[in-house]
Amino acid sequence: MGLLTLSPMGFKTAPDPSDPKKIQLQWNPSLGAGVLAQNGIILNVAISPDMLTVSTLQTQGVQTPQPFLCKALVDTGASGLAIDKKIASDLGLKKKGVTNNLTANGAKISPVYFVSLSFPGSNLKSYDMLRATEVDLANQSFHCLIGRETMSNWHLHYNGQTGQISISD
Protein backbone atom coordinates (compact mmCIF):
# COMPACT_ATOMS: atom_id res chain seq x y z
CA MET A 1 0.00 0.00 0.00
CA GLY A 2 1.37 3.40 -1.00
CA LEU A 3 1.04 6.64 0.91
CA LEU A 4 1.70 10.22 -0.12
CA THR A 5 1.29 13.11 2.31
CA LEU A 6 1.58 16.72 1.16
CA SER A 7 1.78 19.68 3.50
CA PRO A 8 1.88 23.00 1.64
CA MET A 9 4.24 25.44 3.31
CA GLY A 10 2.99 28.86 4.22
CA PHE A 11 5.50 31.69 4.42
CA LYS A 12 5.03 35.40 4.76
CA THR A 13 7.37 38.37 4.86
CA ALA A 14 7.46 40.81 7.73
CA PRO A 15 9.70 43.68 8.85
CA ASP A 16 12.62 42.54 11.01
CA PRO A 17 11.84 43.75 14.57
CA SER A 18 15.53 44.46 15.23
CA ASP A 19 16.02 46.37 11.97
CA PRO A 20 12.87 47.73 10.22
CA LYS A 21 14.88 48.28 7.02
CA LYS A 22 15.22 44.50 6.68
CA ILE A 23 12.60 41.90 5.82
CA GLN A 24 12.44 38.45 7.35
CA LEU A 25 10.71 35.35 6.12
CA GLN A 26 8.34 33.79 8.66
CA TRP A 27 6.72 30.39 8.52
CA ASN A 28 3.01 30.42 9.23
CA PRO A 29 1.41 26.96 9.23
CA SER A 30 -2.08 28.36 8.69
CA LEU A 31 -1.01 29.79 5.31
CA GLY A 32 -0.77 26.21 3.96
CA ALA A 33 -4.58 26.08 4.02
CA GLY A 34 -4.69 29.14 1.78
CA VAL A 35 -2.20 27.61 -0.65
CA LEU A 36 -4.32 24.46 -0.88
CA ALA A 37 -7.55 26.43 -1.27
CA GLN A 38 -6.05 28.56 -4.05
CA ASN A 39 -4.13 25.88 -6.00
CA GLY A 40 -5.95 22.62 -5.24
CA ILE A 41 -4.19 19.28 -4.95
CA ILE A 42 -1.12 19.33 -7.20
CA LEU A 43 0.99 16.18 -7.64
CA ASN A 44 4.19 15.42 -9.53
CA VAL A 45 3.54 12.77 -12.17
CA ALA A 46 5.39 10.93 -14.92
CA ILE A 47 3.45 10.09 -18.06
CA SER A 48 4.72 7.53 -20.58
CA PRO A 49 3.30 5.49 -23.41
CA ASP A 50 1.33 2.51 -22.07
CA MET A 51 3.31 -0.63 -21.21
CA LEU A 52 1.97 -2.61 -24.19
CA THR A 53 3.26 0.07 -26.59
CA VAL A 54 6.60 0.24 -24.77
CA SER A 55 6.98 -3.55 -24.94
CA THR A 56 6.18 -3.56 -28.68
CA LEU A 57 8.67 -0.75 -29.37
CA GLN A 58 11.39 -2.53 -27.39
CA THR A 59 10.75 -5.78 -29.28
CA GLN A 60 11.17 -3.84 -32.54
CA GLY A 61 14.39 -2.26 -31.28
CA VAL A 62 12.86 1.21 -31.30
CA GLN A 63 13.91 3.59 -28.54
CA THR A 64 11.06 4.55 -26.22
CA PRO A 65 10.51 8.17 -25.23
CA GLN A 66 11.53 9.36 -21.79
CA PRO A 67 8.60 9.90 -19.38
CA PHE A 68 7.04 13.36 -19.47
CA LEU A 69 7.41 14.82 -15.96
CA CYS A 70 4.86 17.44 -15.00
CA LYS A 71 2.42 18.75 -12.41
CA ALA A 72 -1.07 17.26 -12.27
CA LEU A 73 -4.22 18.67 -10.70
CA VAL A 74 -6.42 16.22 -8.83
CA ASP A 75 -9.79 17.18 -10.32
CA THR A 76 -12.99 15.77 -8.82
CA GLY A 77 -14.88 17.31 -11.74
CA ALA A 78 -13.00 15.19 -14.29
CA SER A 79 -14.23 11.65 -14.88
CA GLY A 80 -10.90 10.35 -16.21
CA LEU A 81 -7.31 11.23 -16.91
CA ALA A 82 -6.70 14.19 -19.22
CA ILE A 83 -3.31 15.21 -20.62
CA ASP A 84 -2.15 18.36 -22.35
CA LYS A 85 -1.77 18.04 -26.11
CA LYS A 86 1.97 18.81 -25.75
CA ILE A 87 2.41 15.56 -23.79
CA ALA A 88 0.72 13.54 -26.53
CA SER A 89 2.91 15.22 -29.14
CA ASP A 90 6.21 14.96 -27.20
CA LEU A 91 5.64 11.26 -26.41
CA GLY A 92 4.53 10.48 -29.98
CA LEU A 93 1.34 8.86 -28.69
CA LYS A 94 -0.89 7.16 -31.24
CA LYS A 95 -4.55 8.12 -31.20
CA LYS A 96 -6.78 5.20 -30.20
CA GLY A 97 -10.07 6.94 -30.90
CA VAL A 98 -12.04 10.05 -29.99
CA THR A 99 -14.51 10.99 -27.30
CA ASN A 100 -16.95 13.76 -26.60
CA ASN A 101 -15.30 15.71 -23.78
CA LEU A 102 -17.57 17.84 -21.61
CA THR A 103 -15.44 20.79 -20.49
CA ALA A 104 -16.03 24.11 -18.76
CA ASN A 105 -16.02 25.59 -22.27
CA GLY A 106 -18.66 23.15 -23.54
CA ALA A 107 -18.52 19.87 -25.43
CA LYS A 108 -15.48 19.10 -27.57
CA ILE A 109 -14.39 16.07 -29.59
CA SER A 110 -11.00 14.99 -28.19
CA PRO A 111 -8.42 12.36 -29.14
CA VAL A 112 -8.01 9.38 -26.80
CA TYR A 113 -4.68 7.70 -25.99
CA PHE A 114 -3.42 4.98 -23.64
CA VAL A 115 -0.67 5.98 -21.21
CA SER A 116 1.18 4.86 -18.12
CA LEU A 117 1.01 7.09 -15.05
CA SER A 118 3.37 7.10 -12.08
CA PHE A 119 4.07 9.35 -9.12
CA PRO A 120 7.83 10.03 -8.77
CA GLY A 121 9.09 10.47 -5.22
CA SER A 122 6.21 8.51 -3.73
CA ASN A 123 5.27 4.88 -3.28
CA LEU A 124 1.79 5.30 -4.74
CA LYS A 125 0.78 2.58 -7.19
CA SER A 126 1.67 3.20 -10.83
CA TYR A 127 -0.81 2.51 -13.62
CA ASP A 128 0.48 0.69 -16.71
CA MET A 129 -2.48 1.42 -18.95
CA LEU A 130 -4.93 4.28 -18.49
CA ARG A 131 -7.22 5.90 -21.01
CA ALA A 132 -6.31 9.58 -21.38
CA THR A 133 -8.09 12.29 -23.32
CA GLU A 134 -6.27 15.21 -24.89
CA VAL A 135 -7.03 18.70 -23.58
CA ASP A 136 -5.44 22.12 -23.97
CA LEU A 137 -3.77 23.03 -20.67
CA ALA A 138 -1.13 25.30 -22.19
CA ASN A 139 -2.14 28.29 -20.03
CA GLN A 140 -2.17 26.33 -16.77
CA SER A 141 0.55 25.61 -14.20
CA PHE A 142 -0.26 21.88 -14.55
CA HIS A 143 -0.35 19.68 -17.67
CA CYS A 144 -2.49 16.78 -16.49
CA LEU A 145 -5.85 16.31 -14.77
CA ILE A 146 -6.32 13.28 -12.55
CA GLY A 147 -10.00 12.41 -12.54
CA ARG A 148 -12.31 10.19 -10.55
CA GLU A 149 -11.32 7.03 -12.45
CA THR A 150 -7.85 7.09 -10.86
CA MET A 151 -9.11 8.54 -7.57
CA SER A 152 -11.50 5.60 -7.21
CA ASN A 153 -8.41 3.56 -6.24
CA TRP A 154 -7.42 5.97 -3.47
CA HIS A 155 -8.33 6.96 0.03
CA LEU A 156 -7.96 10.73 -0.16
CA HIS A 157 -7.95 12.92 2.95
CA TYR A 158 -8.20 16.67 2.36
CA ASN A 159 -7.66 18.74 5.51
CA GLY A 160 -8.69 22.23 4.50
CA GLN A 161 -7.85 23.69 7.91
CA THR A 162 -4.17 22.74 7.77
CA GLY A 163 -3.72 22.37 4.01
CA GLN A 164 -2.49 18.78 4.44
CA ILE A 165 -3.37 16.09 1.91
CA SER A 166 -2.92 12.34 2.34
CA ILE A 167 -3.41 9.83 -0.45
CA SER A 168 -3.18 6.09 0.10
CA ASP A 169 -3.92 3.24 -2.27
Image (cartoon, grey):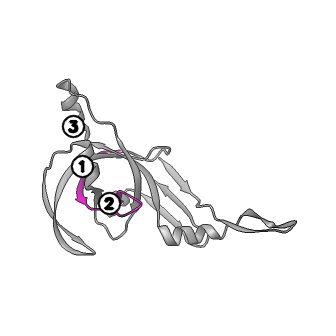
Q: Mark 3 near mark 1, Cβ–Cβ under 8 Å?
A: no
Measured Cα–Cα span from mark 3 to mark 1: 16 Å
As displayed, is residue 43 above or below residue 56?
A: below
Measured Cα–Cα span from mark 2 to mark 1: 13 Å
As displayed, is residue 77 above or below residue 167?
A: below
Mark 3 is surrounded, within 10 Å at the Cα level, by few (under 14), some (14 to 19) or many (20 or more) other residues, namely some
Which residue type carries mark 1? Answer: Ala
- In the rendered image, which residue does mark 1 sit on? 88
Q: Residue placed at 41% from the left, 46% from the top?
A: 125
Judge by depth and name the residue closer to the eye, 125 or 99: 99
Measured Cα–Cα span from mark 3 to mark 2: 28 Å
- In the rendered image, which residue does mark 3 sit on? 52
Q: What residue range appears in magenta? A: 127-147
Counting from the top left corner in percent of width and height, residue 110 is at 17, 61
Q: Earlier in the sequence, mark 3 or mark 2?
A: 3
Counting from the top left corner in percent of width and height, residue 51 is at 26, 38
**Quadrant of the rendered image containing residue 134:** bottom left
Name of the residue lying farthest toward the left: 97
Counting from the top left corner in percent of width and height, residue 117 is at 34, 47
Which residue type carries mark 3? Answer: Leu
> Is 144 displayed left or right of 44 in the figure?
left
State how many labels appear: 3
Q: Mark 2 near mark 1, Cβ–Cβ under 8 Å?
A: no
Disc 3 versus disc 1: nearer the observer: 1
Mark 1 is surrounded, within 10 Å at the Cα level, by few (under 14), some (14 to 19) or many (20 or more) other residues, namely many
Q: Is residue 134 magenta?
A: yes
> Is 93 displayed left or right of 122 in the figure?
left
> Is 14 displayed left or right of 38 in the figure?
right
As helix, strand or loop, the secondary structure at mark 2 comes to loop
- In the rendered image, which residue does mark 2 sit on? 138
Q: Earlier in the sequence, mark 3 or mark 1?
A: 3
Residue 169 seen: no
